[in-house]
Amino acid sequence: MPADFISNLYVFILAGFVGFEVIKRVSPLLHTPLMSLTNALDAIVVVAAIIIAGRHETRLTTILGAIAVAASFSNMVGGFVITDRMLRMFKSGRSKQS
Amino acid sequence: MTALDLQQYLDFAYIAAVVLFILSLKFLSSPTTARWGVLAGEIGAALAVIATLFSPEVTAYRWILVPLIIGAGVGIPLGLVHMTAVPQRTALSHAFGALSAAMIGIAEYYVGTTPVTRFEMGEIALEVIIGSLTFTGSLIAAGKLQEILPQRPIVYRGQNFVSLSVLGSALALAVALVVNPAHALLFPIMVMVALIFGVMLVTPIGGADMPTVISLLNSYAGFSAALLGFVLNSKVLVVAGALDGSSGFILSVIMCKAMNRSFTNVMFGAFGQVQASAAGAKEERVVRSATAEDAAAILSAANKVVVVPGYGMAVAQAQHKVRELYDILAKKGVEVRFAIHPVAGRMPGHMNVLLAEADIPYDRLVEMDEINGDLPQTDVALVIGANDVTNPAARTDHSSPIFGMPIIDVDKAHTVMVIKRSMNPGFAGIDNPLYYLDRTLMLFGDAKQFVGGIVRELGGGH
């Protein structure tokens, strides 16, 4: 088994635990914004897509990479925009009166 | 600067991004800090993307900048959709995320001069299968939510057997590729089979199960990104994928618990079909109905009111009228709260977003477990477009298909009023004994118009 795999597995397991602990504490009130925010963060695969497209090795891989850049970047931009729009709407009774 | 130095810069940018991503989710624990979470996420993502654009490996900028512009051109309008369209937008974004992970995995198979090792082949095959099935599955879910496709489950005899055989063949092709990665012809076939399985996975699932399905697809999309991180040896992808995957997984567990069902039951249960036939034989029972005038009189005489919104409120776009009702009653000194069932609507948290959009303060929105203790002291429970989540058969009737599902105990309130289009049973086809109780008044009509009628009777509205 490659050494890289083991170190990635460590990172995956630890990140999974961190994710579990952090997300458990998110109020059910915000479960919809949670989903759109994690979606925007997950769109970080755009960095891998940029490298595949940018290396320009073969026509096929470049096109696949370019599609991936567009798909994940639209998630990144759209995810942040809609999450912020939703969160702006959540107002408490007190802040509304002031 | 040498290439090595640049690589280190890239690594530091990625580490910073990962830290900011975790902080971003941490800020989401409270509505007061949540918007900082978006900012942290944006800074992290921007750092990572800009650093990558300066990576020495990147040379063909034309192939990056054009897709980035297209991505922004698609993403921004999708970020600006109406709040009622959020569930389908979310399903579509799972599809895009999975598409991008699958595309990169496929490219990775074809890239480079040396053939992939067996171990790498296994990683790539698994990643591409999950990415592909999540892509088509999410598209079907989005189509159902947008009502391009029928929301009812599409089922046929032996469906589970056929679906599992298709999944089995995708996995068998993956194994064949691991045995001999040079069988290049098998790879596109495997991708096709996985794409077909995604369609078969979601078509049998009905609208009421969408909160669970969206969460599961969220989880798959995350885990496919994490697997891609293994393939590319990219820690930032492993972490972001693990965060997204565990978030989707936690939400799926919450949704399943809120329906008292297991994952396998949701994915292979085809819930609605069985019930429709079982509910066939039943005698006509009497219900009491009331007008907007009656409802207004009862509400203005109440001290404590609990509103239970459901998918019907979203469909009728009634949330703004509900807010007018809330304002008038609050002015009259009536305490109004909203009881939110975890699976009300079409995705986790759906009702909260719609009510927040209508400017109802979030401290008025109460979770099911918290409100149930107060319902016996509640004067009026007003159910707007919710059905199964208020069905007392879930507590009492062992033969009911939803027996054991946690519900909002509206039948314990002094008076129950239910706004409903007609007596037709809800989506799952399960009869609701709540409607035949002596304390229940049925308010027949469109949710938006009926609530508007009550508001007019109370002397408000426009």
Image: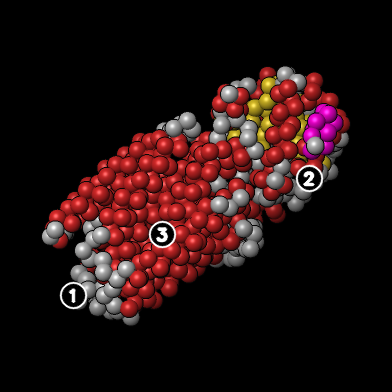
Left or right of A51: which side holds B9? Answer: left
The image shows residue B12 at horizontal and vertical percentages of 22, 48
Which secondary structure lies at badge 3? helix
What residue is rendered at 23% in x and 58% in y?
A: B233
The residues bearing labels 3 and 1 have C-alpha atoms spaced at a distance of 28 Å
10 Å crowding of disc 2: few (<14), some (14-19), many (20+): many
Left or right of B130: which side holds B303? Answer: right
The numbered mark 1 sits on a residue in which chain?
B
What is the span of residues highlighted in magenta in the rendered image?
B452-461
Q: Which residue is mark 2?
A: B446
- Tags 1 and 2 touching, CB below 8 Å: no
Residue B44 visible to the viewer: yes
Is B456 rendered above or below residue B73? above
Which secondary structure lies at badge 2? loop
- Tags 3 and 2 touching, CB below 8 Å: no
- Kind of residue indicated by mark 1: Thr
Q: Which residue is mark 1?
A: B114
The residues bearing labels 1 and 2 have C-alpha atoms spaced at a distance of 65 Å
Residue B265 visible to the viewer: no
The image shows residue B91 at horizontal and vertical percentages of 52, 55
Left or right of B396: which side holds B185? Answer: left
10 Å crowding of disc 3: few (<14), some (14-19), many (20+): many
Q: Which residue is mark 3?
A: A72
Is B36 rendered above or below residue A51? above
Q: Residue farthest to the bottom?
A: B185
Which secondary structure lies at badge 1? loop
The image shows residue B283 at horizontal and vertical percentages of 82, 44
Could you tell me which quadrant the C terminus of chain B lies in?
Answer: top right
